[in-house]
Image (cartoon, grey):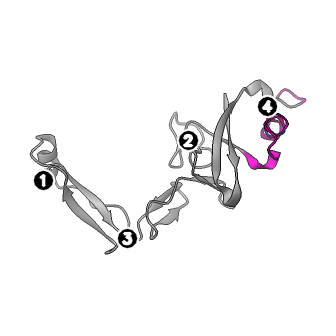
Amino acid sequence: MAHFAKIGLNGKVLTVVPLNNSDMLNASNIEDETVGQQYLELHNNWPSQMWIQTSYNTFGGQHKNGGTPFRGNFAGIGFTWDEDNNIFWPPKPYNSWVKHILTASWKSPIGDAPTLTDEQTNQNLSNTHHWKYVWNEDNQTWDLKDSIA
């Protein structure tokens, strides 16, 4: 089963639809994205070039079964198609975050959240606290929060 994202204005994903692989076969009996796009245009009255194939098994630039990642992420409604980088981007979580092409994900401008200490992790496991780092957009910092307190 193949999946295609229907692309709207500004590259926004409007919906994702499944398509039988048999509806994508070219004259040589090989799966071909352009054949799938033409099929979808015919049956959905939406331009063929506005249907982009996406992989159900790709997330964060990785294929979950060890295969070749395809277009960064499985497209979802509200994602954005980036034709230049050949990636489906999830919605941007914060205005300051930037695209990280290699992982097909958004990153804070100062990098990943710090790692919890062993003490913080043990408190999480014992349910006395639940420490986590959350992004503070106003200060551009990772702030340590206890969600139990």
User: Label 2 sits on what residue type?
Assistant: Thr
Query: What's the CA distance linking mark 2 and mark 3?
Result: 26 Å
Asked if the magenta segment contains residue 8, the reply would be no
Query: What's the CA distance linking mark 4 and mark 3?
Result: 43 Å
Q: Secondary structure at mark 1?
A: loop
The earlier-in-sequence mark between 1 and 4 is 4
User: Label 3 sits on what residue type?
Assistant: Ile
User: Label 4 sits on what residue type?
Assistant: Met
The earlier-in-sequence mark between 1 and 2 is 2
Instruction: Read off the residue under disc 4.
Output: 24
The earlier-in-sequence mark between 1 and 3 is 3
Instruction: Read off the residue under disc 2.
Output: 58
Q: Which residues are magenta?
A: 27-51
Asked if the magenta segment contains residue 43, the reply would be yes
Instruction: Read off the residue under disc 1.
Output: 149
Instruction: Read off the residue under disc 3.
Output: 110
